[in-house]
Image (tube, helix red, strand yellow):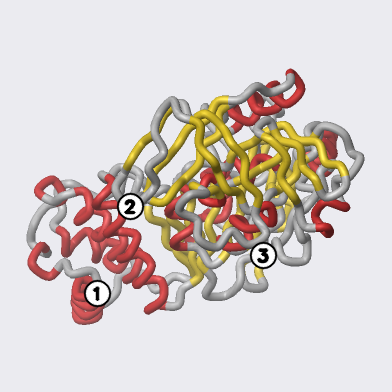
Amino acid sequence: MKNIVKKYGDGFPAVNDVSIDVQDGEFMILVGPSGCGKSTLLRMIVGLEDITSGDMIIGDRRVNDLAPRDRHLAMVFQNYALYPHLTVYENIAFPLRLAKVPDAEVDEKVRAASKTLELDEHLERKPGNLSGGQRQRVAMGRAIVREADAFLFDEPLSNLDAKLRGQMRTVIARLQKSLGITTVYVTHDQTEAMTLGDRVAVLKRGILQQLATPRELYDHPGNLFVAGFIGSPPMNFLPVTVEGTSAKLPFGTVQLPPDKASKADGKGLLIAGIRPEHFEDASVKTDQGSGSTFRATVDVVEWLGNETYAYIPFEAPPEVDAQLRELERDLDGEPMGTQLVVSLDGASRIREGEEAEIWVDGSKIHLFEPATGENLTVDRERCGRIPPPVAEAEAVSRAQAEPEAV
C-alpha cells in the first residue's frame, strides 16, 4: 500500500496517506477504534472499495483497476457470509464450483480443509444448525480451498462470546502458521492484535500512527494515542514536570534514568505515562532496585485472586485534563479519568480508604508532549515506524487539497 487515500462524496478522507508493506507470509494486523479506516483499507485491498489516490500493489502488479475476482485473494467476513440453503460441504466447495474445478479435486480440497478445521462431522449440516465458532470455521474453510495469494479477515471474531473468541484466535494462529500464507487481519480488539500479529498497524482517523511488532508497541509507543490504545488496563496519564532526574508527579517525586530525564528536563508541564503493572505494593516488593516509592490514599480496591487493582484519584491541570478528554474521545470513550490505576500482587493487603506505600519503576515511565502527543522518551530505533508528530496535520491538508482520482 503506497500513499493510499480514500475520500467519499463529502471529501472527508476515511483513509489518509497510508503506506504499509506487508511481507510475504506475514500476519499483519490493522487495529484501531471504530471509524479509523481499517475496514475501508481492507476493502480497498480486496477491491470492494475504489481507491481515490495511491497505489495498491500485490506481488509486482498494480491492482487498483482489477476486479476483486482477478486479485486472487480470499476474504473472511464478520458475518460469515454463508449460503443458508447449502450444506457445510457445498459452502466450502462454492468457489471451486464457480471455477468449474473437477468433482474429484473439489472433494479432495474440501475434505482436506475440513480435516484441518475439525469440521468432518458437520459436512452435511446447514449453517443455521451450527454454532458461531463452527460457522466461522466454515467461512475459513471456503477461503482455504481457494489457495489464494493472501487471506483477508474483517473482524471475524466480533460476533462470538469471549471464551469462543479465545479458542478461535488459537485456530486462526495455527492455521496461518501451518499454511504460511500472507494475512491481513482487521480488528478493534487489542488482545487479538497483540496475540496474533507479527506486526501491528495502529490507525486513528484514517492516519497510520505506528507500525511495529506487538512488543515494540507495548514497550515503545510512539505517541499518546498508541500508548492509550495498547494495554489493558490502559496506561495511566498524569501531569509531570522534570527537573534534573526528578519527575514531580501528583503523588510525589520519582527518579528517572539520566538518559530519559535529559530528553524532558526543562520542557515544562508534560504528561507522564505509566502502565498499571509497573507499580507494586512496597510492603511486598522484595527487590525495589532503582524504583521509587510514594505514599497515597487508596480510594477503591478490586481483589481478583492473583492480582489486585487499586484506584487512587488525583487532580490534573486544565491543559492536561483537556488532552485526556480528547484522547478519551479518540479511543471510543475508553475512560482516561483523573485516577491512578495500579496493578498489585494478589498478596497485597492494601485496604480502601487507607494510605499505602506504592513502589513504581521509574525506568518504565514515558513522557509525552501535551500539544502533539509525541513520546519524548521513546527509542525510535526500537519502535518500528512512527510518522513524525506533524505528519497527521500535513496529511490531512494534502488529502483535502489533492483532486480526486478519476
Task: Give yes or no for contact between labels 3 and 1 (Cβ–Cβ under 8 Å).
Answer: no
Residue bearing mark 3:
21
Q: Could you tell me which residue is drawn at 62 percent across and 40 percent down?
A: 294
The residue carrying pointer 1 sits among few (fewer than 14), some (14 to 19) or many (20 or more) residues within 10 Å by Cα, namely some
The residue carrying pointer 2 sits among few (fewer than 14), some (14 to 19) or many (20 or more) residues within 10 Å by Cα, namely few
Circle nearer the N terminus (3, 2):
3
**From the viewer's perspective, is 21 left or right of 180?**
right
Asked if one can make out residue 56 in the rendered structure from this viewpoint, the answer is no
Q: Nearer the viewer, residue 344 or 33?
A: 344
Residue bearing mark 1:
116
What quarter of the picture does the N terminus occupy? Answer: bottom right
**From the viewer's perspective, is 303 left or right of 406?**
left
Q: Mark 3 or 2, which is nearer the eye?
A: 2
Q: Could you tell me which residue is drawn at 48 percent across and 56 percent down?
A: 185
In the rendered image, the vertical position of residue 109 relative to residue 32, given as above or below: below
Residue type at tag 1: Thr
Residue type at tag 3: Asp
Residue bearing mark 2:
306
Q: Could you tell me which residue is drawn at 57 percent across and 42 percent down?
A: 235
Q: Residue furthest toward the top?
A: 318
Label 1 – label 2 distance at C-alpha: 36 Å
Circle nearer the N terminus (1, 2):
1
Q: Could you tell me which residue is drawn at 77 percent across and 60 percent down?
A: 379
**From the viewer's perspective, is 308 left or right of 338?**
left
Task: Give yes or no for contact between labels 1 and 2 (Cβ–Cβ under 8 Å).
Answer: no
